[in-house]
Image (cartoon, coloured by chain):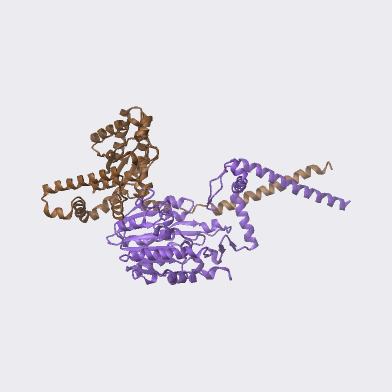
């Protein structure tokens, strides 16, 4: 009798399990039909797939069904929660590596340094060489900023197989031949950053960018080479975001309560600027953007994001003019340049549509600075394209 | 069996309910962790405050800093470009005017000859750089005719604000966007869309005047330049009576410019039948090459 009851109870249990499964499958899938489609996931920082268009061609070659599959996965009801649950599971299982991101000590998420194609940076090096040797009269500075994967190496899980950034950098320097040019200085901020990292945070824990403090330390190194003195006490530090969770958290499944603080360094002696977003044809009077701060990626408080060509005029009495070839790391550092230059042209090769040589002719620059982080620089091919005179954005060239 | 049945449903609901509660709980945690806004109103105000200055204010500030050197530079440039160095040495001021005109006439005749013989050369590197420098603060405003300035690679896209197949009433709507760029000079280049769009020429003239007024109001201190509305090719003109009215529109445009005291640049003399694209409406690069050489002399 008892045995039979247990048997029945077990039967009910399995029935129930199957029943719940069917309900979940059925209801959730029904729900996903009516669930409103989102364009962008803030938590994952990426655009979500939209409903594909049905065409005979797409149906026949099988791409339509593949697209529908992606679409349904991306637009699953309450997707953010499932993603979070998955990360919770991973954390319980002790996973510490995902999508190229390590879960390191002290709450740091660190993107591993990796070079997919050695040729790219090598080519950029050659193009830089020929570009800078054409402009011998301009003092040039090249600063490749080491990423957290090198500076905070000790925090990575022990034995993590991360490519050696230092070795890559030394090799690149040697191969590019840039050291042989008399007008070029290669600024190495590593020792400064490593020293500073002992006391303060120089990288965000949840984002691949550096903190404004980190940028100030590297600027100190650069300023020494450029021939002016950086005084830390001439700047006020203001925190503008205290719960910043960056792209590394969004890009990995390591969601946690770790939060970062975004600080701005504002000069005590006020300086007026005119910021001209050339390609967007807009002018503003500040290099900081409150829209960026409140947007999906608060790091965009610096300049509102990355733009192809930004021309900045300042009320500085300096006669120096700077051409800054840069990636997003430079956005946090830009503020420090303002008192020392009367004009700055910031060119982000990835979005630039102009012709660099004619820009050189107009600009009358006294200084050129190449400012990238090593990871972006190692993966970038757009800089070598624009230095070659081909625009990466559109088919350029003179009639 | 009959007794146990309700309990199955009850258990099913209990489990589903538990699941839902768990789900809601996780959702709450999730919202707490990821969606919490970390920007205080103060911080936003700080950042807003940094950009409180008006663009005009800073422009004026920058201008005042450069005042002394820039005035002398300006006259330098005028002398450099319009008159050859040798000529300055020889010429008195009245003769200088004459030689200036002469050299312009010479250039003009050369351009016409090149156009007729179809031997117009590319802009060389020097010309290209002069072009960039001269039009750095200029925006070419209009439809596809203006768009070609950038797409042919003469200037950067930052120098062009074009709305394809736009008519004057559409362009008026776009003025606030143009104003954000605070251009010093705007060159308006519109094409045949208006001839197709406006039944009456009077309405066209009215809208165009309004556009000029609005532009002056929205972009303080801007210099406006208007360039001809070009006719279609003879072939297209023969089959499209609406587009064939182009010369009348252009005539009206000149009147508007005169009335509004806006510089009108006649570029109809550059048009040659073999410089049309296949559509018989747009011009090829040859046209723009001569056009830009002409503009450079006019504004130099």
Q: Quadrant of the N terminus of chain B?
A: top right
Q: Position of residue A316 (x, y in %)?
A: 29, 59
Q: Position of residue B193 (x, y in %)?
A: 37, 34
Q: Residue furthest top?
A: B200
Q: B136 or A269: nearer the eye?
A: B136
Q: B80 or A159: nearer the eye?
A: B80
Q: B300 or A8: nearer the eye?
A: B300
Q: Position of residue A182 (x, y in %)?
A: 34, 71
Residue sitting at 63 percent across and 63 percent down? A94
Q: B85 or B252: nearer the eye?
A: B85
Quarter holding residue A100: bottom right
Tint applied to chain B in the drawing: brown
Tell me the purple chain: A
Q: Is residue B122 visible?
A: yes
Figure check: A31 above or below A292 = above
Quarter holding residue A131: bottom left
């Amino acid at each position: 009798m008892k045995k039979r009851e247990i048997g029945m109870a077990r039967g009910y249990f399995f029935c129930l399990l199957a029943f719940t499964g069917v309900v979940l499958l059925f209801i959730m899938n029904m729900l996903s039909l009516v669930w409103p489609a989102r364009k962008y996931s803030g938590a994952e920082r990426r655009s979500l797939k939209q409903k594909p268009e049905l065409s005979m061609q797409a149906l026949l070659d099988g791409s339509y069904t593949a697209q529908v599959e992606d679409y349904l996965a991306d637009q699953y009801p309450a997707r953010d929660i499932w993603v979070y649950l998955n990360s919770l599971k991973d954390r319980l299982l002790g996973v510490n590596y995902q999508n190229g991101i390590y879960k390191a000590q002290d709450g740091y998420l660190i993107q591993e340094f990796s070079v997919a194609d050695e040729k790219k940076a090598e080519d950029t090096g050659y193009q830089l060489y020929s570009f800078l040797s054409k402009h011998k009269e301009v003092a040039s500075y090249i600063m490749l900023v080491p990423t957290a994967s090198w500076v905070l190496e000790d925090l990575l899980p022990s034995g993590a197989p991360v490519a050696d950034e230092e070795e890559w950098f030394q090799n690149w320097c040697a191969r590019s031949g840039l050291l042989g040019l008399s007008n070029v200085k290669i600024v190495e901020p590593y020792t400064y950053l490593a020293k500073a990292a002992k006391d303060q945070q120089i990288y965000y824990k949840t984002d691949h960018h550096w903190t404004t403090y980190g940028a100030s330390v590297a600027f100190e190194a650069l300023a020494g080479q450029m021939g002016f003195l950086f005084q830390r006490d001439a700047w006020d530090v203001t925190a503008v975001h205290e719960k910043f969770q960056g792209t590394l958290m969004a890009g990995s499944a390591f969601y946690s309560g770790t939060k970062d603080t975004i600080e701005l360094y504002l000069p005590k002696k006020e300086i007026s600027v005119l910021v001209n977003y050339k390609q967007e044809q807009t002018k503003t009077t500040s290099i900081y953007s409150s829209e960026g701060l409140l947007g999906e990626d608060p790091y965009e408080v610096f300049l509102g994001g990355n733009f192809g060509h930004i021309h900045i005029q300042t009320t500085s009495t300096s006669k120096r003019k700077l051409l800054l070839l840069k990636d997003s790391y430079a956005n946090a550092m830009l503020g420090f340049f303002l008192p020392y230059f009367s004009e700055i042209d910031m060119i982000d090769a990835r979005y630039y549509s102009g012709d660099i040589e004619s820009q050189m002719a107009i600009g009358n620059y006294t200084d050129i600075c190449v400012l990238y982080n090593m990871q972006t620089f190692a993966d970038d091919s757009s800089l070598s394209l624009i230095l070659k005179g081909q625009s990466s954005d559109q088919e350029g060239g003179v009639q | 069996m009959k007794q146990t049945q309700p309990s199955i449903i009850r258990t099913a609901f209990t489990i589903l309910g538990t699941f839902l509660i768990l789900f809601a709980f996780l959702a709450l945690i999730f919202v707490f962790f990821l969606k919490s806004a970390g920007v205080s109103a103060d911080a936003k105000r700080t950042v807003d405050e940094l950009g409180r200055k008006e663009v005009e204010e800073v422009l004026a500030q920058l201008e005042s800093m450069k005042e002394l050197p820039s005035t002398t530079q300006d006259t330098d440039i005028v002398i450099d470009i319009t008159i050859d160095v040798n000529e300055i040495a020889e010429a008195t001021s009245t003769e200088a005017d004459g030689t200036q005109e002469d050299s312009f006439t010479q250039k003009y005749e050369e351009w016409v000859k090149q156009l007729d013989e179809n031997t117009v050369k590319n802009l060389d590197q020097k010309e290209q750089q002069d072009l960039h420098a001269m039009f750095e603060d200029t925006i070419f405003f209009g439809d596809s005719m203006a768009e070609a300035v950038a797409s042919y690679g003469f200037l950067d896209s930052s120098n062009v604000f074009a709305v394809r197949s736009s008519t004057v009433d559409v362009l008026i709507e776009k003025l606030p966007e143009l104003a954000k760029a605070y251009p010093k000079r705007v060159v308006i280049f519109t094409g045949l869309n208006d001839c197709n769009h406006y039944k009456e020429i009077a309405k066209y003239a009215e809208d165009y005047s309004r556009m000029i007024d609005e532009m002056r109001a929205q972009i303080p201190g801007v210099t406006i330049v208007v360039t001809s509305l070009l006719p279609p090719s003879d072939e297209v003109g023969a089959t499209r009576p609406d587009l064939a009215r182009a010369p009348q529109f252009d005539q009206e445009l000149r009147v508007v410019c005169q009335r509004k005291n806006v510089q009108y640049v006649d570029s109809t003399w550059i048009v040659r039948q073999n410089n049309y694209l296949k559509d018989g409406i747009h011009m090829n690069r040859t046209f723009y090459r001569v056009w830009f050489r002409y503009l450079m002399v006019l504004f130099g």
